[in-house]
Image: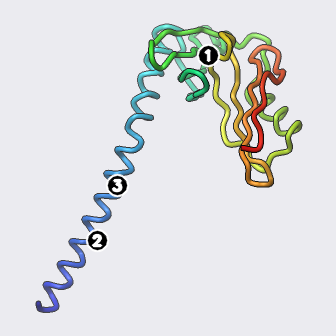
Amino acid sequence: MNRNTKILLAISLVTLAVVSLITYINLSFAPYSSAKSQSYDIAETSAKITKPDYFGNYSRDKQYYSVGGLTNKKQYRYVIINAKTGQTTLVDKGDAPVRQTVINGVAQRYNPSKIMHINLGLYQKKPTWEVAFKNKNGSIGYNLVDFKSGKSVQLINNI
């Protein structure tokens, strides 16, 4: 093999590796992107949310997708979608604590090194925030927080 052939072969292999990596990443995110897009469509039709600014994927007993945002009447609302059945639950924010307040409460109670996510779903048929956090010792914790009151409903810690 001459030098030009070796260079062309090396470039081809690197290009193939990069294209394969990009394809893998794209396929990995496809289900998430599809769920998010479909959830936004459902939020617009069933909850009249015109400006979504929150998407969550809650996985406890059942899987739920949730979308939050403003309606055309400037009212903040969430829609919780059962991932299996498509059944929706509408929840107006009303006097419920905002997401950041829930995050701050969990951070105050458990002093984690990092809050990993906050997702809205149904727990025992009630709207509930699931806040996942990483403890300073490297273990994981989950705190379920009642949507309306902001009180802790369940704690799973040091996993």
* Disc 3 element: helix
**Number of residues whose C-alpha sits closer than 10 Å to that of mark 1, classed few (under 14), some (14–19) or many (20 or more):** many
Question: What residue is shown at x 78% (from left), y 31% (from top)?
Answer: 155
Judged left or right of residue 39, residue 55 is right
| Quarter in which the N terminus is drawn | bottom left
Residue carrying label 3: 22
Q: Residue at x 35, y 58 (%)?
A: 21
Q: Amino acid at mark 2?
A: Val
Q: How far apart are the two marked residues, 3 and 2, measured between alpha carbons? A: 12 Å
* Residue 77, horizontal then vertical, whole percent: 63, 14
- Amino acid bearing label 3: Ile
Instruction: Indicate which disc, 1 or 3, sits on the residue closer to the N terminus.
Output: 3
Classify 10 Å Cα crowding around label 2: few (below 14), some (14-19), many (20 and above). few
To which quarter of the image does residue 6 belong? bottom left
Residue under the image location 34 percent in, 44 percent down = 27
Determine whether, in the image, residue 105 is placed left or right of residue 27.
right
SS of the residue under disc 1: strand
| Tag 2 residue | 14
Residue 3 locus on image (x, y percent):
16, 91
Residue beneath disc 1: 78
- Upstream in the sequence, badge 3 or badge 2? 2
For residue 15, above or below residue 73:
below
Q: What is the C-alpha distance between the residues marked 1 and 2?
A: 46 Å
Would you say the residues marked 1 and 2 are in contact, meaning their CB atoms lie under 8 Å apart?
A: no
Label 3 Cα neighbours within 10 Å, binned few <14 / some 14-19 / many ≥20: few
Q: CA distance from mark 1 to mark 3?
A: 34 Å
Residue 80 percent coordinates (x, y): 57, 16
- Residue 21 lies left or right of residue 132; in this view the side is left
